[in-house]
Amino acid sequence: MTDFADPLADKHQNEEGAVFAPRFDASGLITAIVTDIGDGQLLMVAHMNAEALRLTLETGIAHYWSRSRGTLWKKGETSGNLQTVVEMHTDCDQDALWLKVRVAGDGPTCHTGRRSCFYRQVVTANGTSALVMLLETK
C-alpha cells in the first residue's frame, strides 16, 4: 500500500526535496492534468483523492475522483480506453499533478467520444465571447 508523507511545512524541502508529499485541498482532492505521452495533447483535467492517487501509483492505471458523482473511477474501465500512466510529475508546491499517459483502445478520453475534453476554443469578437468547435472528429 502506498503511503504519502504529510505535507511539508518546510517550503524549501517541499520545493527542492525528494519527499512526495501531495497537498490535497480542503475537499481532500488534488488536481490532475492529463496529456498524451506521444504528442503532448492535453486530454483532460480531473481530480484525485488519496485513494485514487494510491491506486494510480500501485496499478499504473489512472484513477480519479468524480466530483459530480461523488465516487472513485478507473478511467476507461467501461470504454476500454484505459489510461496507462507513463510519467507523473508534481508542481512546485505539490498541489497539482501532471500525468503523461498512453490511452488504450480507440483512444477517446472525453465522455463525448472525443480524444480530448478540450474540443472547443473560446473566441472573442466585438466584445462577445463564443465557443468554436475544433476540427477534430469524434
Image (tube, rainbow, N blue to C red):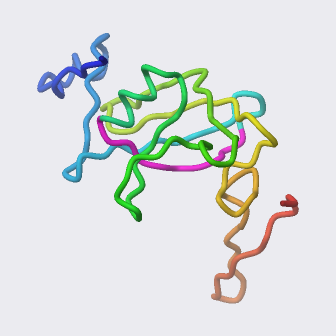
Q: In this rendered view, identify the residue nearer to me: 56 or 92.
A: 56
Q: How many marks?
A: 0
In this rendering, the answer to whether 126 lies above or below 134 is below
Q: Position of residue 40 (x, y in %)?
A: 71, 35
Q: Position of residue 6 (x, y in %)?
A: 16, 25
In this rendering, the answer to whether 72 lies above or below 60 is below
Q: Position of residue 109 (x, y in %)?
A: 67, 49
Q: Residue furthest front?
A: 78
54 relative to 12 in the view: left or right: right
Residue at x 70% of width, y 63% of height: 112
Q: In this rendered view, identify the residue nearer to me: 59 or 136.
A: 59
Residue at x 87% of width, y 63% of height: 135
Task: Please identify the quadrant where the N terminus is shown.
Answer: top left
Task: Please identify the quadrant where the C terminus is shown.
Answer: bottom right
In this rendering, the answer to whether 14 lies above or below 70 is above
**Residue 48 included in the magenta stretch of the image:** yes
Residue at x 52% of width, y 50% of height: 45
**Residue 112 included in the magenta stretch of the image:** no
Magenta span: chief secondary structure: strand
Q: Please report the bounds of the magenta region as a residue range.
A: 41-50
Q: Position of residue 65 (x, y in %)?
A: 40, 48
